[in-house]
Image (spheres, rainbow, N blue to C red):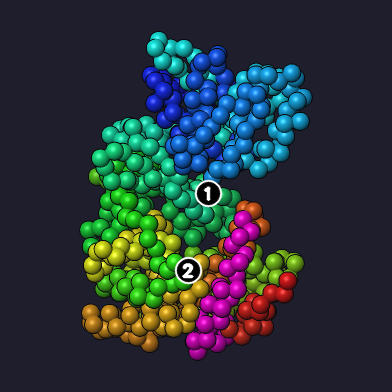
Amino acid sequence: MAALMLERLLADETQTARLGEDLALALRAGDVLALKGDLGAGKSTLARALIRALADDAGLDVPSPTFTLVQSYDTRIPVHHFDLYRLSSAAELDELGFDEALAQGAALVEWPERAEGYLPGTAVLIELVQHGDGRLARLSGQGAAYDRVARSLAMRDFLESAGWGEASRRHFIGDASARSYEIVSLPGHAPRVLMNSPRLVLGPPVRDGKPYGVIAHTAQSVSAFAAIDRALLHAGVSVPEIHAQDLDQGFLLLEHLGSEGFLDGHGRPVGGRYEAAAELLAMMHDKSWPHRMEAAPGVFHDVPPFDRDAMLIEADLLVDWYVPMLTGAPAGDALRVGYHKEWNAVLDRLADSQYTLMLRDFHSPNIIWRAERSGHDRLGIVDIQDALIGPAAYDVASLAMDARVTIPPGIEKRTLDAYIAARHAAGPFDEAAFLEAYAIMATQRNSKILGIFVRLEKRDGKPYYLKHLPRIRDYLRRALSHPALAGLREFYTAHGLLEEQTP
């Protein structure tokens, strides 16, 4: 497979440093960036800017490793800076711990030609050559690392088109999907958020010839975010204003709503903030929402339904991932048949529930607290692209049984009470039907999350999600206590799905 190539003209050191920043945002553990060029070509300037961007420290001392041969930095992604100019032979890379360095982080390699083919074929080559009074950077390679570098440079081009080409970029946050977010800063302007949302890569068919993402109605492009964002903003919900967008590439330049969350300084939930969020949901659920929303002139997003197939395939994650972890073997056919029978009976009870715009992940990581504002504007809402038309009770369950925060029963009750009071104040409201739907949706969501957190450990190598399992089991016990779920509760109990695990 032939290597791909990009070029960037670097008129001065500032632009060289900016390229280093762009490369830092693309870097992952295991990546190798090979920096090639004559003495004085700017390799050290580029490497220094990259390392400082990873450290988020513009004044970090980054000495040249000419004599030490390697310098290591404990940055967001550990990075090891190799200078091979004094290397006698490529075999000396073993003595320098090159393979060990890649196992724990990324490598920047100056004078890569002295490695004599020792570098992996996935290395990204960055060659700096004289070009007038400046430099020309030629970037070439193949594979995931090169693709990430190319996308990061495309993001810089997007910022340029939005008038923010000279902005500094810093990693902000990533999530369980392929999306990532950066804080971009430009003197004289409030910081903004750069959203990188590549088109969803659908996996293999899992049921009826359809991939999981299609059945569960996961957003496939950033157009979903743009459309839902505009609809919510028009309705008075504080979501980020979109300052610039490229729907084809999946880039958005967004208002930065802030960074204060729903927890106190000790990581405990602040009950009043959960009540305020419940009241915001009540306001939203008292409105009528279109099923077709406009992302841009002539570009529309049809909000999918949270239908039975989507509910069941999400609930099946418990059987697919959590049950094998409990038992050491895949779930048997009898368990699956019984599980579906009980779940179908429960979902039948949702027939008369209120369906509305359902944001799907309405919980503390996606809600910003803005104490200086008043009313509903105190709550800034993000991560909205996967919204569906579904039971109103779902988002209340997502909030009151926050997957990553232990919500005591007292705060859960206060959250529910705040929502119910606001709905009653707005007009006729069937409280009993809502509480039944709340129990059903809380059970469905927490069953799904048990499976997802195990999958993140088993498939994606992220074991830190397992610490949340006891909390999710406790939430399940609370939800299943509703009389309407007696049959499902008996099934979960009979198969040990609610029991605490022994080490």
Instruction: Say what amino acid the circle numbered 2 marks.
Output: His
Disc 1 packing (10 Å; few <14; some 14–19; many ≥20): few
Left-right relation of 298 to 449: left
Task: Note whether 428 is above or below 280 in the view shown.
Answer: below
Task: Note whether 71 is above or below 478 in the view shown.
Answer: above
Please give the name of the residue rendered at 77% of the width and 24% of the height, measured from the top-left corner: 91
Please give the name of the residue rendered at 56% of the width and 73% of the height, measured from the top-left corner: 472
SS for dot 1: loop
Residue 202 appears in the rendering: yes
Prevailing SS of the magenta stretch: helix
Q: Looking at this view, is 1 or 278 the one in front?
A: 278
The residues colored magenta run 462-488
Q: From the top left corner, tell me how far across and down residue 320 is, in percent.
A: 64, 64
Q: From the top left corner, tell me how far across and down residue 77 is, in percent.
A: 56, 43
Task: Note whether 356 is above or below 99 in the view shown.
Answer: below
Instruction: Say what amino acid the circle numbered 1 marks.
Output: Leu
SS for dot 2: loop
Q: Which residue is mark 1?
A: 202
Q: Looking at this view, is 283 or 152 the one in front?
A: 152
Q: Is residue 37 magenta?
A: no
| N-terminal-most mark, 1 or 2 | 1
Q: Which residue is mark 2?
A: 266
Q: Where does the N terminus fall, quadrant-wise? A: top right
Whole-Å distance between the Cαs marked 1 and 2? 39 Å
Left-right relation of 172 to 235: right
Q: From the top left corner, tell me how far across and down residue 261 is, in percent.
A: 39, 63
Q: Residue furthest top?
A: 132
Left-right relation of 42 to 354: right
Q: Nearer the viewer, mark 1 or mark 2?
A: 2
Q: Where does the C terminus fall, quadrant-wise? A: bottom right
